[in-house]
Amino acid sequence: MRRLIWFGSLLMAGCLLSVSALHAQSNLVPFGAWQRASETPIISPQGSTWEAAGTFNPGVIKRKGKFVMLYRAQDANGTSRLGYAESADGIHFERRAEPVFRPEMDYEKDGGVEDPRIMQVGKTYYLTYTGYNKHDAQLCLATSTDLIHWEREGVILPAYKGKWNVGWTKSGAILNKKIDGKFWMYFLATSAKHVDEMGLAYSTDMLHWTEATDSPVLPARAGQFDSTVVEPGPPPILTHDGIVLIYNGADDRHVYRTGVAVFDRHDPRKLLYRSDKPLFEPEKDWEKVGQVPNVVFVEGMARKGQDFLFYYGGADKYIGVAEASKQ
């Protein structure tokens, strides 16, 4: 009996320690609870041409004091281009009349250019995007010095190849600081389980990338909000406590919600923390009804004073913005 009591005490102590450790890990996240900074979309489809069907999946970066957004715009035929918008306050954006990035290469034709994420090193802006030709989707890269004129660098992680990928590649989120002499990129690929999971690659020149792990660095979790899709969001940020990565997760009913993971600042492979519950989920009608129902999909993040702004697509049709205060 004493041994049972002693063993039970050890189990309880272990559980309390685990809860305490989990709480301590949650403090690695540099922001608090999310709320919508606008109750209505900040960008919606318009006109009858290149952005008539949908405006969504926004990448955002600050340049010369302004918030610059590149967003995926879709025409009635389902072809995607990238639009450009600017804002002084991060909420109210003015759009250019014409797209700044159009499908041109064979690996982009008909389907288009999708899912922009933007980061900067020195005076160069790096754009990761999905090239889709209605047969294959592949992770591609382009560079610019002004965010308007872009030079293609080609496919950087091809589909159906790699250490564990058996399908498409998408969604490259690159950390803009070197670790161990390398740049690091989290990306989406399809595992042999036919689940979309997150991988990790590295590069010394930003142009040539090598997979860093033999299996997903952030796998799907059965029965949770990220059971079928685990997809990188905006480019991760490096904090004193780790590499903070917002990601998008889909469950078995294909509802998309937002999570966060923190990796070791000295080893981007090592996971320190992962949210058990989503930070953000579809609530508004325009997040629940659109081209794809029940989707909030975050791709852009920027600082505004002490706050973080998070830019997302709603139901693959609209663009919204959420905010959270620094903690």
Image (spheres, rainbow, N blue to C red):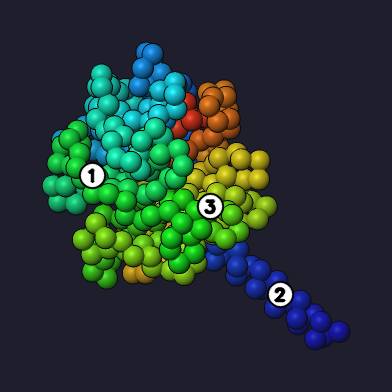
- Is label 3 in contact with label 1 (beta carbons under 8 Å)? no
Tell me which numbered mark, 1 or 2, is placed earlier along the sequence.
Answer: 2
Separation of disc 2 and disc 3 at Cα?
36 Å
The residue that disc 2 covers is 11
Graded by Cα atoms within 10 Å as few (under 14), some (14 to 19) or many (20 or more), the crowding at tag 1 reads: few
Q: Amino acid at mark 3?
A: Asp
Q: Which residue is outermost to the top?
A: 47
Graded by Cα atoms within 10 Å as few (under 14), some (14 to 19) or many (20 or more), the crowding at tag 2 reads: few
Q: Nearer the viewer, residue 5 or 220?
A: 220
Q: Position of residue 279 (x, y in %)?
A: 52, 44
Question: The residue tagged with tag 1: helix, strand or loop?
Answer: strand
Give the number of marks: 3
The residue that disc 3 covers is 196
Q: Quadrant of the N terminus?
A: bottom right
Image position of 267 (left or right of 285): left
Please give the label number shown on residue 152.
Answer: 1
Tell me which numbered mark, 3 or 1, is placed earlier along the sequence.
Answer: 1
